[in-house]
Image (spheres, rainbow, N blue to C red):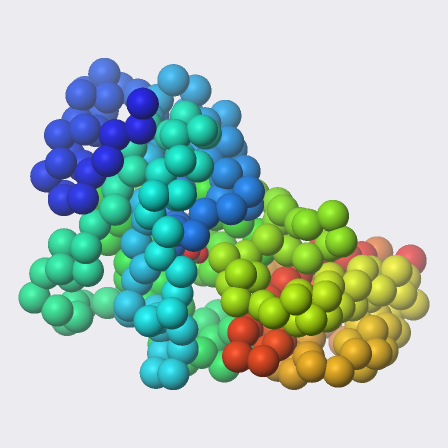
Amino acid sequence: MTAIASTRDDLAKLLDPARRDGASVGFVPTMGALHDGHASLMRVARERVGDGPVVVSIFVNPLQFGAGEDLDRYPRTLEADLEVCEREGVDVVFAPSVDEVYPGGDPQVTVAPGPLADVLEGATRPGHFGGVLTVVAKLFGLVKPDVAVFGEKDYQQLALIRRMSADLCLGVDVVGAPTQREPDGLALSSRNRYLSPEQREVATTLSRALRAAQREAVHGVDAALAAAHAELNRVTGVELDYVEITDPALAPLPETPAPGSEARILVAAKLGTTRLIDNMSLRVGR
Ligand code: PAF
């Protein structure tokens, strides 16, 4: 039976006994609107902590939404989310109010995410990653997990949270879990539900572009990017923000990468008012 806590005190009461017994605590932070991608994160957390408690937080964090972004329309589906957590054997759901997380309003002290937050998503969404890292740091402080699991779908977010845990010595093992996809390749995302049927069809272009780049990457970065662009240009209704190839840590690739070097291709595009992101690994050159 999944227990629900909406206050810090309730959360502490639920977790303190397990902590006293020396159990490892697994944590999956979410903004709700849970789908199979989230369920897979819960399963990874369970594998990591065995009989220890798995905690899922459900909190739509205002601090990570910019002006004109989708904070107000972000899907809030608590009942259905609790069913997913129950099904996955989650021990505790922490679903706090905004006041509970930010008593007294926006915090005066926040986490500065550093230069990695200025590129890719951060270039289009200034302030976004500061908001993400601040809430994740707070949630780590409240849940005190041993292990926290995040999806590779938000690859830059995962990289930044790893970096925060290491640089600020938070002592949390940050684990990345593979992106879950629909049978036609679309990466699972809470925002997919905004798409009209026509947009939903066109949305598969993102993963097709990444796969095309993977295939062409043996011929080098330029060939891979050209293949991605060709796929993205095949359709109308996809307003490309970026498609970029970086090294696995999101640093620029060297001018002539060693043959077979591991890299990451990342894409972001708007379909109508919905912004989608995706990414895959690839090897550049042969
Ligand atoms: O990936 C998300 O859902 C959010 O960015 C997170 C990590 C829960 C922080 O609000």
**Of residues 79 and 213, which is closer to you in this image?**
79
Against 20, residue 30 (above or below) is below
Task: Name the residue: 66% across, 66% down.
Answer: 197
| Residue 15 in view, yes or no | yes
Residue 259 visible? The answer is no
Horizontal arrangement in the rendering, residue 70 relative to residue 230 (left or right): left
Q: Position of residue 177 (x, y in %)?
A: 56, 43
Vertical order, 74 against 52 (above or below): below
Of residues 159 and 47, the one nearer the viewer is: 47
Rendering coords of residue 66 (x, y %): 36, 78
Q: Residue furthest left?
A: 104
Instruction: Give whichever of 256, 15 is nearer the camera.
Output: 15
Residue found at the far front of this picture: 197
Q: Is residue 190 left or right of residue 195?
A: left
- Horizontal placement of 250 versus 223: left or right? left
The image shows residue 262, relative to residue 171, as above or below, that is: below
Say which quadrant the N terminus sits in.
Answer: top left
- The total number of labels drawn is 0
Quarter of image, res 129: bottom left
Q: Position of residue 118 (x, y in %)?
A: 47, 77
Q: Where does residue 286 sit, x and y in percent of width and height? A: 91, 58
Residue drawn at (45%, 29%) of the image: 88
Q: Residue at x 25, y 46 (%)?
A: 95
To which quarter of the image does residue 163 belong? bottom left
Front-most of 170 and 156? 156
Q: Residue at x 24, y 53 (%)?
A: 138
Task: Assign ligand 1 to one image quadrant.
Answer: bottom left
